[in-house]
Amino acid sequence: MAVALKVVDLQFLPPSEELLSGREQAFFNTLKLPKRAGEWLGGRFALKTLISSHLNITPKQVEVLPQEDTGKPALWVLGKEEKNLAFSITHSHGYAVAGIDPENKYLGIDLEKIAPRIDAWKADFFHPGELTAQGDDFLTTLWTQKEAAVKLLGTGLAVNSFDVRCVNGQVSFYGRALEVYKSLGSPAIALSSPALISGFAFSIAVGKLL
């Protein structure tokens, strides 16, 4: 099967008590900023919906909790940590999206609202070789491709943006990003940017071990 996606409008979220386990609710209660709390809940709603449907269980039997050492989300199913199901969560400007890929090892997704970008932002985050075109649509899509690839690596902000380069739908790694990529087994990466929400750019990075 292809990557399964779930889009959630953050204006229409269920009460947290209907969705979250006790452990998740305890963490949710620590989120004091409404915007952050809504994004967090929306991402979990999207992911739990996908996984509960895939495994034929209830959403409360799926838990998405931050890892103690890194803070990155970890997946628990029926009380046991699930390390074999690739998943990713993203959110932007009122929407949350989750993705799962039962067939491949690694997955990263990213959603960003298309908006004007200043030249300084472009210079800070893109290697000159990536700038094969211009315009808000192109630059925002390129940014989502880079972010999806970084999420696939699982490094967060620990790698330099220039060390992840996307050119014409192909991703290559350098420096610290290349070291992490090799540590994952150098998976073959498929990068795509399908239309998902009007006015937004969205990208998927899938990593398959050969």
Image (tube, helix red, strand yellow):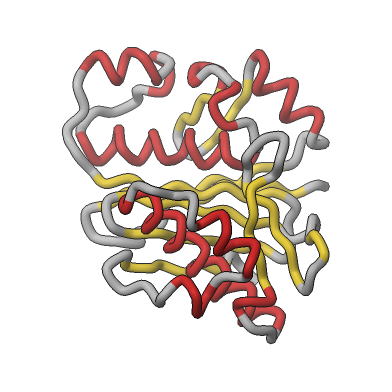
Residue 151: image quadrant is top right
Figure check: 19 above or below 165: below
Q: Is residue 174 left or right of residue 204?
A: right
Residue drawn at x 38%, y 48% as measured from the top left: 32
Percent x, y of residue 31:
44, 49
Percent x, y of residue 139:
30, 32
Query: Which of the image's four quarters has the N terminus?
Result: bottom right
Q: Is residue 174 left or right of residue 19?
A: right
Residue drawn at x 49%, y 21% as measured from the top left: 161
Percent x, y of residue 153:
66, 36
Is residue 203 at all visible to an observer of this figure?
Answer: no
Q: In this view, does 174 lie to the left or right of 115?
A: right
Q: Nearer the viewer, residue 141 or 7?
A: 7
Is residue 96 at all visible to an observer of this figure?
Answer: yes
Q: Which of 61 and 143 is in front in this view?
A: 61
Figure check: 175 above or below 8: above
Figure check: 23 above or below 163: below
Residue drawn at x 35%, y 22% as measured from the top left: 131
Residue drawn at x 47%, y 60% as measured from the top left: 43
Figure check: 115 above or below 60: above
- In this figure, what is the number of numbered marks? 0
Percent x, y of residue 204:
51, 50
